[in-house]
Each structure stands twice: as C-alpha cells, then as structure tokens.
Amino acid sequence: MTTSTLPAASVGSAHLPEHAWIRAIPLLPRNALLGVLHAYRATVSRLYGDVCRYYPSCSAYAVGAVQQHGAIKGAAFAAARIARCHPWAEGGIDDPPARASFPHALTRHGFVVPLRKD
C-alpha cells in the first residue's frame, strides 16, 4: 500500500522499535484488520476505480476509523458509512470521527504502533 492511496491523516512516520513489540500485542487485531483493508484497497478497490460519492472513499474511511477506534468500533463506523453510501446519497466530504486523544502513532503504511517512551 503506498502512502498516496491513503488520506494524509491516515499515514505517519513512526516505526515499531524492536523492544516495543510486547506493547504492540494489543494492537494486533487492529493491524490485522488494517492489513485486510490494505489488501482490499490494493486489489478490489482498484478494479472499481473512483466511484464513491463520498470523500474519502468508503475503504479509506474504514482505514481511518479502524486506526482511530480499533477493530470493533472502527468496523461499526465503516459499516454505518457503507449503509449511508447509496445511489440517492448526496455524498461529499465525510471524514471518520477522530478521537480526542490518539494514544498511538502511525507508520508510513498506515499501521498503528505504540508511542515511543524514551
């Protein structure tokens, strides 16, 4: 997944230090779902092209929602967005809701890692 296919808010410059992998275990479900979404965006989403009525597209919205809120709540936000996306929808800009404080960092590929504690 290249950074150009995700909105700027969905990518970062962090990386997972070797000594922090234990703190990253709770983030595995979130990152596993992000991996599935990245695979979808790299294959199926490219076949359809730019047909979404909203910006960001539903799959980019799902990436942002899962990054911000986790696998379960992010998937619920994404499902609600997909339910709103129909031929009679007005469309427009519809960003995923951001958390007041995001306790993690993002990699350049959009995966979530713990903040460094130096």
Image (spheres, rainbow, N blue to C red):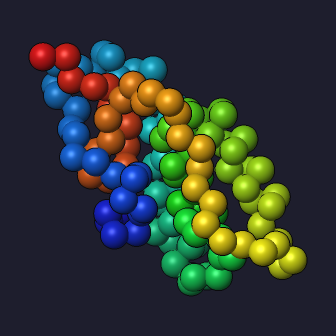
Whole-percent x and y of residue 4?
Answer: 34, 69
Splitting the image into 4 quarters, where does residue 47 fall? bottom right
Q: Quadrant of the N terminus?
A: bottom left
Q: Residue at x 51, y 71 (%)?
A: 43
Whole-percent x and y of residue 21?
Answer: 27, 22
Q: In the image shown, does 94 or 47 lie closer to the viewer? A: 94
As displayed, is residue 81 above or below residue 57? above
Q: In the image shown, does 69 or 41 lie closer to the viewer? A: 69
Whole-percent x and y of residue 41?
Answer: 51, 66
In the rendered image, the residue lying farthest to the left is 118
Residue 106: in sight, yes or no? Answer: yes
Horizontal placement of 38 versus 15: left or right? Answer: right
Horizontal placement of 55 versus 3: left or right? Answer: right
Q: Residue at x 66, y 34 (%)?
A: 73
Splitting the image into 4 quarters, where does residue 8 fall? bottom left
Q: In the image shown, does 53 or 66 lie closer to the viewer? A: 53
Horizontal placement of 81 versus 74: left or right? Answer: right
Splitting the image into 4 quarters, where does residue 76 fall? top right
Q: Quadrant of the C terminus?
A: top left
